[in-house]
Image: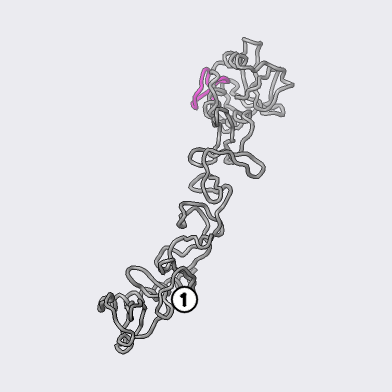
Amino acid sequence: MDKYKNLKTAVKSAMLAGAAMTTAVVAQQEVSHADTLANIQSQHKSGYLNADGQWLWFENGQRYTGFRFYMGTYYWFINGVRQDSGWREAWGMKYYTDNQGRAVQGNRVINGVAYNFGDNGTFFFRGKTSGYTDAGEGWKWYEGGQKFTGFRFYMGTYYWFENGVRQQNKWENAWGMKYYVDGDGRASQGVKNVSGGTHYFGNDGTFFERSIKNAMPDQAKKMLGLPYAWGGKTWSGVDCAGYVALVRSQAGLPDIGSVTWNQAAYLRSHGSQPKSYSQAQPGDLLFWGGTGNEYHVGIYLGNGQMIDSATYGTVTGIRGVWGDPQAYMVNF
């Protein structure tokens, strides 16, 4: 790093020294005044001069090859002639001058590849561009100088790019999974409504679409340890139905009520009919008590386990299923 830093300092010092010298020379001369080559040579003139109708750079009367500072930027000259659109080498470094002969800085696309030339006034080539940047063609994502297609993490979330361009409101496929990027181009997470349908993209930072039935168990696992409170449905305390209601609210799922028998009735009225516990699937709600007289509810995890708020003196947690509850499929 120190060697690299010293090299940058040396390059900048060399360019600034040239700038100081040539600025002083130009200030002393009428560069717009036509001159003759013979006069420039005999008087050892320096600067960007009009010699017999051709603008050339001279140093002590001789045509110059290399970088010189002129009118606020650096130009490259060969035998006095300004050079446009090409790679240059000086001080052991590589540079590029644009179609007006100026040394480029920042990120630039050259012949379809994006390159980085720094931003501290030294102009030398650092490497091929990577990341989200404007290289003269608008903001795009580059990898190794090429426009990138796929997901990339940027400013706290994931975005999908196609040929470098950020995509919005689209389904995308990657790693054998489906994803959806929203109106800001961000990968969706949690429960989202897409084109009138409800979809679930997890809550663990993986963003791929999965069954909506996973939404309640996933959210419930993040809400363990809440104290039991009869009739409670807040973070301060919950009963069994209040816990289900709070979990669904935090997951972005529709409200089905916060009283046990009302929740079961809501499910029946929306197409979910009770089935035996032996047929239960992860994400189902388990109810104890006969139809219309339900008195307890839990969220089934599978393998004989559930999450619920059990009774006074306990907290929400994972427990074994007891008795013979009825199971209701919940896919909304």
Toward which corner of the image does residue 59 lie, by quadrant?
bottom left
Q: Is residue 17 visible?
A: no
Toward which corner of the image does residue 269 lie, by quadrant?
top right
Compare residues 153 and 174 and report the one nearer the observer.
174
Q: Position of residue 187 (x, y in %)?
A: 54, 40
SS label for mark 1: strand
Compare residues 206 and 120 and report the one nearer the observer.
120
Identify the residue at horizontal 45%, vertical 70% (top origin): 5
Q: Position of residue 90 (x, y in %)?
A: 46, 76
Q: Position of residue 206 (x, y in %)?
A: 59, 41
Q: Is residue 176 visible?
A: yes
Compare residues 94 and 96 and report the one nearer the observer.
96
> Is residue 289 toward the left or the right of residue 58 in the image?
right
Q: Position of residue 323 (x, y in %)?
A: 70, 18
Whether residue 207 is in magenta: the answer is: no
Quadrant of the image containing the C terminus? top right
What amino acid is at disc 1?
Answer: Ala
Q: Which residue is mark 1?
A: 90
Q: Which range of residues does the magenta coloring cover?
A: 227-241
Whether residue 238 is in magenta: the answer is: yes
